[in-house]
Image (cartoon, rainbow, N blue to C red):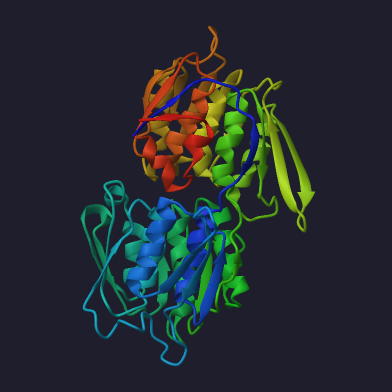
């Protein structure tokens, strides 16, 4: 699908979609729980649907309730684990020789469920789309092997991957260029057999706020664990049984960055509804970053009554800055676009792991912004963007989203401020996390 963005002022009020990271964690915990969970207002996107399909394939019963518009209001989940039997995949593990699990484009689903599969003795084979089959899980697979699992994979730890337990415990050491490796182990380890102790050494860890998020769920479950202050070591006893996971899924700061950016490039003002500034999501730093660049960012509301944040670009003169994105690599595409409209040289640093996402986002953003006349310099761990076009706005023309949802949405936001129409190939990828975003920008789809 192609999307054509015509430059225009972007203003209005936008309810931010639910967080993908929270939605997937809650769905997995609910599927692993002993009892029935109710997940209110989950994210309805391709990635969330991929996780839902995997949980169903493993045997979880999931009932979807929608409102009058067909939008999901809640998922009601009957968990897989029964406390009287104490084994995983209780309904099918004695009758099915293997599980075939398709994670679509969802790397979060792949990495988190790889560790969960190591808890059971039925082989689980994971596959996915072309991008997923290029994303290595080698470090995680080595850790699972050290903990007792049997694994096999395509070259470099890529899908298709087969994992089979049992989880025997012990100590593993794992470098985590993506925090999802560590989150996977943290979510699975408490469900190992009673008396089984799992030690995890993490000499390298990026995206630490996502570990805070994962630990907040273990805390809510009452799971005991010990950790080093810098998250370099964990010790987790087995024998836990997860309780039902209820409540409303928080809104997504990663998604909120795109309509906010559109207000800046489109010289308008947008009010974003549903975000909680006290949430553990690392991408909330986005609003601090654009404030430093000269955008007007105003929070209003309260924890009891709900929050709103208004981002205005109609009178803002954006200025360049230096930003360390190690904890928030998903912000690289959108920050690169905002930098293109700022005066001066912006440096996005310490984010080499952006190269191992759905695409090499550093290389891709340099290439696509270059097509718009923006001077970019790739660094091994980041990007330098020289904004403030001397002749006016960035060019219009044709760009490629490379099948990456965040690339597509970032380029779409750029299109609101280009000198002419911007045509984006592969625009359907935006539905991975933010269905409706292109419609929000009045894009012409063909």
Q: Report whether residue 349 is seen.
A: no
Residue nearest the observer in this picture, 56 or 210: 56
Residue nearest the observer in this picture, 236 or 50: 50
Q: Report whether residue 254 is seen.
A: yes
In x, y percent, where is residue 410? 49, 33
The residue lying furthest to the top in this view is 391
Q: Which residue is drawn at 59% across and 75% down?
A: 221
Q: Quadrant of the C terminus?
A: top left
Q: In which quarter of the image is the N terminus?
A: top left
In x, y percent, where is residue 80? 42, 79
Q: Which residue is drawn at 59% across and 42% down?
A: 256
Q: Which residue is drawn at 62% across and 72% down?
A: 220
* Figure quadrant of residue 376: top left
Residue 295 placement, left or right of 3: right
Above or below: residue 222 compared with residue 64:
below
Above or below: residue 14 compared with residue 34:
above
Q: Residue at x 27, y 51 (%)?
A: 133
Residue 34 placement, left or right of 109: right
Above or below: residue 435 compared with residue 10:
below
In x, y percent, where is residue 285? 63, 43
- Total labels: the figure holds 0
In x, y percent, where is residue 428? 37, 39
The residue lying furthest to the front in this view is 68
* Figure quadrant of residue 117: bottom left
Residue nearest the observer in this picture, 286 or 24: 24
Residue nearest the observer in this picture, 436 or 68: 68
């Amino acid at each position: 699908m192609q999307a054509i963005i015509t430059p225009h002022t972007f203003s209005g009020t936008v309810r931010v979609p639910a967080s993908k990271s929270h939605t997937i964690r809650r769905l997995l915990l609910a599927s692993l729980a002993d009892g029935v969970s109710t997940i209110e207002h989950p994210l309805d996107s391709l990635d969330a649907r991929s996780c839902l399909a995997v949980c169903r394939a493993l045997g979880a019963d999931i009932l979807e309730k929608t409102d009058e518009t067909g939008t999901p209001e809640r998922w009601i989940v009957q968990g897989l684990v029964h406390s009287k039997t104490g084994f995983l995949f209780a309904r099918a593990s004695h009758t099915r020789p293997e599980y075939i699990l398709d994670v679509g484009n969802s790397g979060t689903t792949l990495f988190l469920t790889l560790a969960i599969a190591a808890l059971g003795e039925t082989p689980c084979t994971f596959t996915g789309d072309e991008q997923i089959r290029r994303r290595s899980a080698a470090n995680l697979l080595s850790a699972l092997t050290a903990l007792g699992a049997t694994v096999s994979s395509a070259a470099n730890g890529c899908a298709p991957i087969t994992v089979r337990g049992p989880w025997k415990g012990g100590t593993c050491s794992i470098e985590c260029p993506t925090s999802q490796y560590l989150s996977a182990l943290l979510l699975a380890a408490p469900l190992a057999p009673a008396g089984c102790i799992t030690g995890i050494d993490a000499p390298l860890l990026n995206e630490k706020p996502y570990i805070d998020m994962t630990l907040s769920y273990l805390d809510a479950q009452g799971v005991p664990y010990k950790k080093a202050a810098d998250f370099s070591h964990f010790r987790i006893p087995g024998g836990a049984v997860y309780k039902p996971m209820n409540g409303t899924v928080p809104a997504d700061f990663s998604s909120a960055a795109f309509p906010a950016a559109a207000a800046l490039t489109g010289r308008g003002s947008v009010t974003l509804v549903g975000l909680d500034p006290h949430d553990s999501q690392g991408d909330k730093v986005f609003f601090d970053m654009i404030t430093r660049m000269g955008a007007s960012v105003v929070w209003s509301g309260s924890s009891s009554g709900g929050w709103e944040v208004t981002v205005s670009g109609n009178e803002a003169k954006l200025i360049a800055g230096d930003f360390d994105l190690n904890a928030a690599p998903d912000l690289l595409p959108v920050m690169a676009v905002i930098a293109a409209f700022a005066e001066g040289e912006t440096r996005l640093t310490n984010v080499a792991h952006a190269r191992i996402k759905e695409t090499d986002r550093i290389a891709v953003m340099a290439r696509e912004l270059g097509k718009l006349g923006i001077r970019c310099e790739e660094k091994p761990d980041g990007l330098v963007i020289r904004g403030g076009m001397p002749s006016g706005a960035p060019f219009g023309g044709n760009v490629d989203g490379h099948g990456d949802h965040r690339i597509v949405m970032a380029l779409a936001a750029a299109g609101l401020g280009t000198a002419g129409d911007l045509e984006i190939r592969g625009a359907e990828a935006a539905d991975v996390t933010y269905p409706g975003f292109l419609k929000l920008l009045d894009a012409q789809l063909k």
